[in-house]
Amino acid sequence: MTVDVCLILEGTYPFVSGGVSSWVHHLTSKLPHISFYILHISPKRGFYTKGHVYDMPDNVKGVREVYLHDYVLSSKGRPTGLAEKVEFFRQLVEDMREGRSGSFAAFLRALQSEGNEGFSAFDLLQTFESWEVLVDNYRREAGNESFLNFFWTWRYAYLPLFNLLSARIPRARVYHTISTGYAGLLAAGAKERNGSPMLLTEHGIYTKERRIEINRSDWIQDWDSGEIVAERKAPYFRRYWIRQFQMMSRITYEYADEIFTLYTGNAEEQIRDGADPNKIRVIPNGIDMERFGEAADRFDARGENDRFTVCFLGRVCPIKDLMTFIGAMRLVADEVPDVRVRVLGPMDEDPEYAEMCQRHARQLGLEQNLAFEGKVDVLQELPKCDVMVLTSISEAQPLVILEAGSIGVPSIATNVGSCADLLYGATPEDRVLGAGGAITPMASPGETARAVLQLYYEPELRKRMRDAMRERVLRFYNQDDMVAAYDEIYTGHANKSPIQHLRPDAEPDPEPDPDSSHRSAESTAEPEVVPEPELVTLPIPELPPEPEPEEFETLDETATAPSPELQQTGVPAPKREARRRDGDIPAPPETDLDQTLADVLECTRDLANNPEAPPPEEEIAVRKLPSDATPTPEPDSDPDEDPNATATELSSFISAPKARTNEIREANFAGDKPTGEDDA
């Protein structure tokens, strides 16, 4: 397969709908003269039961899946020079532990050697040479942790790398990954193998999102041993996984010829994670003004809604924090009993969390107000909304704010990612247009409800926000500008590729037949799974003294000053606060992001089952360690468990509804109120 651009994706297009998938679909559709191929990383075979959820354009020549957790254990004989090959793996492990990437290329070459010269996942798991690598690393960094847990963590960490880096990759003039992590690592391998330029566009910061997931995951088996200790660090195995993802990002940044991001705040985080500031360029999202212009006309032409309508538009998943949204809507319904609340977006990403949200809405008595409507046609449904609300705990540059703004629907969003830039303006020229919505703190049902009610009671404010946001999107977030930028980028890098120049009429080459030399778990061949040999004869290492644990890194998003590296790029510093018109919603108070995230992530499902429960007292996390010199490890984890695809719940604390309602009533919502009519 020879194409102009190979897009390397993970957990998104064309199998999942959402912001990044929409971005990819629009980009490929708007560049019909460029041929694309999709190389998609999936957790395992058959994971996406619905298949493709997009009708891909004709210039997308094909889709191939590479599976992280369908391990192929080859039955071929012992490869020649195995001991030497395993040393490449040992060096890779050491480099990833120490934050280096120098051994990646040598390991990749050893892995891809033809015939009996290469080595496979079987060699990694089933030989004494690789066992010694595992044991040595256990002794060096985790001697006081459960060896059983370390073994399975090791397996889950490195087997996917074999599947990725031994995968067959189509020939392309440019490789373009839309994230770091596994997709970024595969893109780095593609560049190393074929020599074509590699580009990275990062919407959300991959390491940040994985850190949030890891810190609230239940698939990581931590083992406590010793005495009672006050801990401010994450347990070892969580630190281990965070380090793995950080190294994947670092390798991706190192191999990328250019790095594109959506806004300057992302650029700051990329630099902190190891990106070269001289490679970074900001290209914001864009909106198809022709398509959404028609929706804006329908918004202007419709009459006043019979019921004031508040919409949430997005995937129903923990990172969107629907629990805060539902709690806020309970407070709004106490003031506006006939308010209509619509949750618009797919609910199949995390069915358990979706069920928890539906149950919570019933417990708060919102059956007559709130409806979960699933995936909808955005162009048809957004014009029916009066206000759009986004309560996420992490975002990059959410398309839904731009889509709503282009139609004329003001948004209320949490103070994450570039939401403040989108609603208040990112530059002096942009800010003079005025506010296009309101920013509220994370995990704050009361403040979210307050902002919604202010827009309900002040239709003139909604109208000013409508006009400001429409003009902002038209001037600064036009999709034509974004597409033109990537067209130029693809052409420029393709001219440097060893595989000729861009061919508008590029057709796929015949697909090679899979054979036994390809040991990757891909959709083109069913793997031959060989039973694993017994490991009982392998020596169990002695437990050395506990090493000093490494510090658990966090990101400080409250910083507003740019780093010296970012100043050198000429990229303006991110603005966390902007001027507003007199009488508009005031700026939110400064928030300690790390503390807020910690508060949100500490909440449990019990809060959903008992919305009247008081907030938990602030506690210092403790680890209880038995005094035995020979601790008993926890039970074995499931070898078929899929850690990287597991979606877990996030519950945010919601104050007692009546108490919050009284607060709002006492704060400028008592007495004479406007009629609440929408004059749009």
Image (cartoon, rainbow, N blue to C red):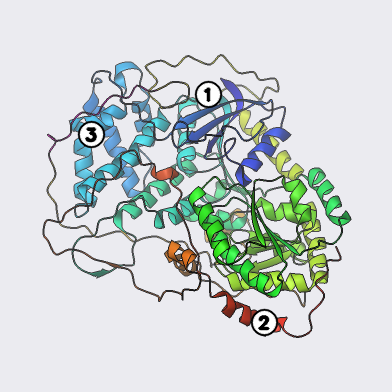
On the picture, is 316 further left or further right than 154?
right
Q: Nearer the viewer, residue 47 or 116?
A: 47
At 11% from the left and 59% from the top, the residue drawn is: 629
Q: Earlier in the sequence, mark 3 or mark 2?
A: 3
Task: For the C terminus, give its image quadrant.
Answer: bottom right
At 49% from the left and 64% from the top, the residue drawn is: 608
On the picture, is 122 further left or further right than 628?
right
The kind of residue on which mark 3 rests is Ser
On the picture, is 570 further left or further right than 308?
left
Mark 3 highlights which residue?
Answer: 130
The kind of residue on which mark 2 rests is Arg
Q: Nearer the viewer, mark 3 or mark 2?
A: 2
Would you say residue 426 is visible in this rendering?
A: no
Q: Nearer the viewer, residue 467 or 88?
A: 467
Q: Tell me, for residue 170, which label it has, or none.
A: 1
Q: CA distance from mark 3 to mark 2?
A: 67 Å
Q: CA distance from mark 2 to mark 1?
A: 62 Å
> Which secondary structure, mark 3?
helix
Q: Tell me, for residue 665, which label it has, or none.
A: 2
> Which secondary structure, mark 1?
loop
Q: Position of residue 537 (x, y in %)?
A: 12, 34
